[in-house]
Structures are given as structure tokens and as C-alpha cells.
Amino acid sequence: MTKISINFAKNPLDVYDVVPPLGNDYHLFLQPMDNSRLCDLAVRRMPQNYRVTDARVLGMSNIILNQNGYASLENICFNPNISDKVIDKEEMSFTAVGKQIEFSTNAETTIDNAVFIGGHWNFGHWLFNHIGRFCFISDELRKDATFLLPTSLTETQIEMLKYFGVESSNMLLIKPGTLVNVRQLLVPQMPWHSISEFGTWWSPGVFKELRKKLGLHTASVTNASRKVLLSRKNTRWRRLVNEDEIYKSLEKFGFEMIDIGTLSIKQQFELGQQTSCLITPLGANSNFFLNLPSGANVIELAPPMEFMNVTGPFATASGLKYKQIVGTANNTPGIPKIDQDYFVDCSLVVHEFCSLTA
């Protein structure tokens, strides 16, 4: 077993070379999401892809060493300060020795040309941190490349990759503890991420671009007749405790209650294209909005919380009409505030639906 010591640099420009993604395509520029001062100044950032010569990708992580043994996490992973956004929760090969981080490798492989996509167990982060990277890769940049992904991806996540031209023949699923040496590695821009001093950034243009790449941009809301309430009954946390009661109050308007976890990606796309109004509890299922035709209505039912309120701007950037209804948390002892089950008044849901569709 080989141990590799990791040196970190804050600025990725000190570690990696920059490759222009798609020219000066302004609609893909990034903008601040939660820094009010930068928002007021209308600051924009050009996307940056990184080229790493003689790169070393360390297992199922976002840690990529250059030829001098340095890595940077800013603009590479969603948030450098959250461990599972840096290292996959199934990767156990990293240890801290004093202030030094070491990676222990038990397997090694070498490839010539690769694109780093990475992955995450949370479907929203998978979509808008990792799948979204395909929006910044031209045909020339991806030519003859192998796509690097963690072996922890689910079948549903792997199924989605096919829509971006990634098949078993041109992907490498990295196993825990594996060192991947790449002679020329491309790391595309992550379209939604945090930067330590400047808060969260996102690329609004990515949402319509993703819909286009997935073939979801041609459906018309005038031809969409289904009304859908998504279920979170089978989740471990943040459950809508009166979900059945809300469904009964909506049934007379023609709503169906569906657990999208039982559907394939193709079936989810088809359902979304037929849906004119979506009501969804906050969670990974909220990301179903991406499948809806432009102009459709989205009503999100949420517990009281200070963070994670991103569905609104994301749905709006996708050309949808969005409204959030905040409920009341159960306040169960021992459960973090963000994971509390909650209740939403049925009459508020019916009123909002009638207001949106009047």
C-alpha cells in the first residue's frame, strides 16, 4: 500500500491551467446567489475549465493532484468545508496525520485523456454539481476522453449519463482506494458551488441548457394535462406528515400522487413532459421540476429552514412558475432542524393551486 501526502492551495489558478469552456458564452456566466453585496453589483464570472497535466485523481473524491503534488478544492467541489462534498462517504482511504492529509492507495491505473465529472449520492447535487458540468464541455474538449466517476453511483445516475453520450465503453468508475493517473485531465466548471469568502455561485443558463441536452425543451405546457403530487413517504427524514390529507384535498382537481423513486429516468422524463402543475415536498424529489414543460407551475411544500431554498431560483431559471408554502416542523427531540418532519395546512395548498391556475 502506497501513502500519498496532499498539499492544498486555496486558489485553483495556482494549481491548474485554465481552458476556456465554450468561448464567451454569456448565458452560462456564473453569478452570486447569497452574497447581497455582490448581487447588488451584478457581478458575473466567466466559467473556468481546468487542464491538469500528469494529474492524480485520489479515489472517490474531488481531490486532484497536479504533477507537483498540489490540489485545490475551490471551484472544484460544491463546498470545500463540507466533508462529503469533498470525499465520497464510501471512501475510507484518507487519514489525517497531524495537519497533513494522506491518501492510502491499494490499486493504480493510468489513462491518457480523461474528463473529471465526479458524483454525489444526493440527486440534486448529482444533477446540478456534476451532470451540469456537461454544459461546459465542447465536442472538441471531450473527444476520445474517458469520463471519471465514482463507483458509488446508482443505476439511475448511470442511466442519466447515457443522455450525455457516456456509455460503459468511455467511463471509468473509480473504486475506493484507487489512484488514477491521467496524462491530460479536463475538470469542467461546476455550475453551482460555494467559494469560501464569496458565498454560493450558480449559472442560471445551465438549467435551460440541461433541459435542451436531455431533450426536455420542446414540450408545450398547453399539451400537458397531468397534475402531480410527489410523495416522500418512503424517505427517512423531512417527511410531510399530512401528505395523504393533502392528496385527498387535491384529488377533486385531478391530482395523482406518485413516488418518482419507482420510475426509471425515461419514465420520469415522460411524466414531467405531461405535467402542467407539480406539487412537491422539499427534498431530492423537488428536482423533478427540471422535467416540466416551460410555463408549468411548481408549488413546493417546505419545513421552516434557513438554508436549502434553491428550488425557487432554479425552477424560475428553467422557465417555470414557482411558489413555496412553508409549514410547521414537528420539533422532535434529537433530530436536526433540517431533517424534521413537518405539517402543511391543506387549505393553503388548495388556495395556492387555485390562485396559480386561475
Image (tube, helix red, strand yellow):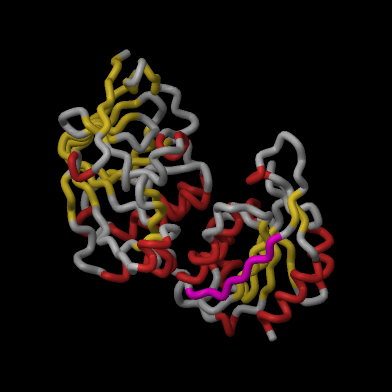
Q: Quadrant of the C terminus?
A: bottom right
The one nearer the camera, 123 or 327, is 327
Dominant secondary structure of the magenta stretch?
A: strand
The magenta stretch is 319-326
Q: Residue placed at 46% from the left, 47% from the top?
A: 158
Task: Between residue 223 and residue 296, name the one nearer to us.
Answer: 296
> Is residue 213 in view from this perspective?
no
* Quadrant in which the N terminus appears: top left
x and y, in percent, of residue 264 in the image: 57, 55
Q: Quadrant of residue 28?
A: bottom left
Image side of residue 150 versus residue 278, left or right: left
| Residue 316 vertical placement versus 260 (above, below) | below
| Residue 254, image quadrant | bottom right
Task: Name the image quarter holding residue 13.
Answer: top left
| Residue depicted at 34% across the width and 38% down the height | 172
Q: Position of residue 9 (x, y in %)?
A: 25, 35
Q: Is residue 150 visible?
A: yes
Q: Which residue appears farthest toward the front when viewing the image?
A: 37
Vertical position of residue 303 compared to residue 315: above or below = above
**Count of marks placed on residues:** 0
Task: Please state if 37 lies on the left or on the right of 287 as rendered.
Answer: left
Which residue is at 17% across, 34% downward? 54
Residue 275 appears at what percent x and percent y? 62, 72
Residue occupying the point 55% across, 52% down: 307
User: In the picture shown, does residue 320 fall above or below 235?
Assistant: below
Whether residue 317 is in magenta: the answer is: no
- The single residue placed furthest to the top in the displayed view is 1
